[in-house]
Image: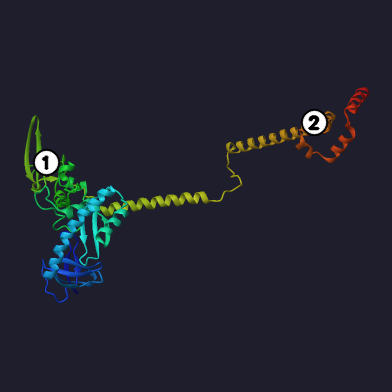
Amino acid sequence: MIKIVGVRFRNAGKVYYFDPKDYALRVGDHVIVETSKGPEYGVITTGCKMVADDQVAQPLRAVVRIASEEDEALIAEIRQKEKEALKVCREKVREHELDMKMVGAEYAFDGSKMLFYFTADGRVDFRELVKDLAGVFHMRIELRQIGVRDETRMLGGIGTCGRELCCATYLREFQPVSIKMAKEQNLSLNPAKISGTCGRLMCCLKNEEETYEFLNARMPKMGSEAITPDGQTGKVVELDVLRQRVRVLFEEGDTKELEYFPVEELTFQPRKKKDSTAQDQGKNKGKKAEKAEKTEKKEEKTEPKDDRKAEGSSEQEEAPRRDKGQEAAQQGEHRKKSRRKRQKADNSPASAGDTSAQAENGEKPASKKRRRHRSRRQGAEQKEDAPKHTSEMKIYADKGSQSD
C-alpha cells in the first residue's frame, strides 16, 4: 500500500496523484509539486488515502511544499501576465492572417516557457508566429491545438439547465456521447435542444444512460398488445418511463378508451435483449465458414490436371479439338502451296532477266529477301542460262521462239 494525494492544476482538468510525504494536507490547500515539466502550482482535490501499488503510475513524484504567501503573490502575477500575453498573441495572429482562434495562455511557474492554446479547422503553419512571439517574450514558446470541448472547458459558462457547465466544474474526462442515448431517453432529436454550448451533444446525456436502459428493459414496446388484470386486451400507445406507467387504448366498436396502468399489473411480451455473446459467436461462425470455402477453392485450383481423357468423356468435348486439328492441317497445306508458287516464280527465266536488268541499271532488286533462301544450284543454273546484256536477251528470246 502507498499513500497518495490528488492535485489539479487548473479549474477543470485531470487529477494527478503525488506523494504527500509528512504534510497534513486537506482538500482545497494550495501546494507546489514537482512534475516532469518542472515545479507547478496546484490545488488539492482528494485528501490523503492509501491505495495498492499497482493502481499508481510509477514513478510517484512528491509534494515539494505547501504554497506560501510569496507563491500566492507570484501566481497572481503570472495570471495577470497570461492575460496580457494572450492579447499580444491575438494581435500577432491578425498580422500574419492565420485562420486560428487563440483560447488561452499559460505561463510556467518557474518562468521557463509559455504555452498558448488555439482552435482551428485544420492544420496551421504558425512557424513565423512562434518566431515573433519568442522575440517579444524572450522565452520558449509552444502552441497547442485543442478541440471545441476543451475550449469550452477552459472558458467556462452556463448551460441550458441554468447551472455551470459540467466540463468546467467536475467532469475530468470526456466520454463518447451518441444520438442513441437521446432516443433511449425519449428526447427531441432537434440538434438545438440536445447540443451543449460547444455545439456537440450534451455530456449529461451519458449521466442517465444506465438508468434509462434499466427502466426501458421493463417496459413494453410501443404498439404492442398488453393484457390488463381484468383480462382485457389493449394497445400500448404511450410510455412514462420514469414513473413506470403505460397508457393502453381499448377499442370496442366505435368507442375508444384510454387508461394508465402500472407496468407491474400488465402482461405483455418482453423486449428482446440483444445478446452480444451470441452475436459474436454468430460472426465467428460466419468467418470460419468463409475461410473453409476459400480453402476449398484453393485446393480445387491446385489439383493436378490429368492429360488422359476420362472413359466417359462426351463427344461434344472432343468435337472442338478435332475441328482445331483440321484447321491447323489446312493452314499447313496452304503455307506449303504458297511456298511452291514463290519458288516457281523465282526459277522462271523472265524473273532472272528482270533481276539482271536491274543490276545493270544500278537498281536494287525488289525480291532481296527471297534470294537469301534460294539454293546454290538454282543460282548457278540461272547464271548460266540468263543473258548478261539486253542484246543477248533479244537473241535468247528468238532462240526460244524458234525452238518452240
Q: Classify residue 58 as left or right of residue 348.
A: left
Q: Amino acid at mark 2?
A: Ala
Q: Classify residue 126 as left or right of residue 241.
A: right
Q: Which residue is mark 1?
A: 238
Q: Amino acid at mark 1?
A: Glu
Q: Is residue 347 above or below residue 91?
A: above
Given residues 221 and 345, the one toward you in this image is 345
Contact flag, marks 2 and 1 (Cβ < 8 Å): no
Residue visible at 6% across and 42% down? 260
Crowd band around label 1 with a 10 angstrom C-alpha radius: few (<14), some (14–19), many (20+)? some
Residue 49 visible in rendering? yes
Image location of residue 268, percent across then percent down: 14, 45
Given residues 33 and 57, the one toward you in this image is 33
Image location of residue 122, percent across then percent down: 30, 49
Image location of residue 195, percent across then percent down: 17, 46
Residue ranking furthest to the bottom:
22
Crowd band around label 2 with a 10 angstrom C-alpha radius: few (<14), some (14–19), many (20+)? few
Q: Which residue is mark 2?
A: 345
Residue visible at 41% across and 52% down? 291
Q: Is residue 262 above or below residue 364?
A: below
Image label count: 2
Q: Earlier in the sequence, mark 2 or mark 1?
A: 1
Q: Quadrant of residue 170?
A: bottom left
Quadrant of the image for the C terminus? top right
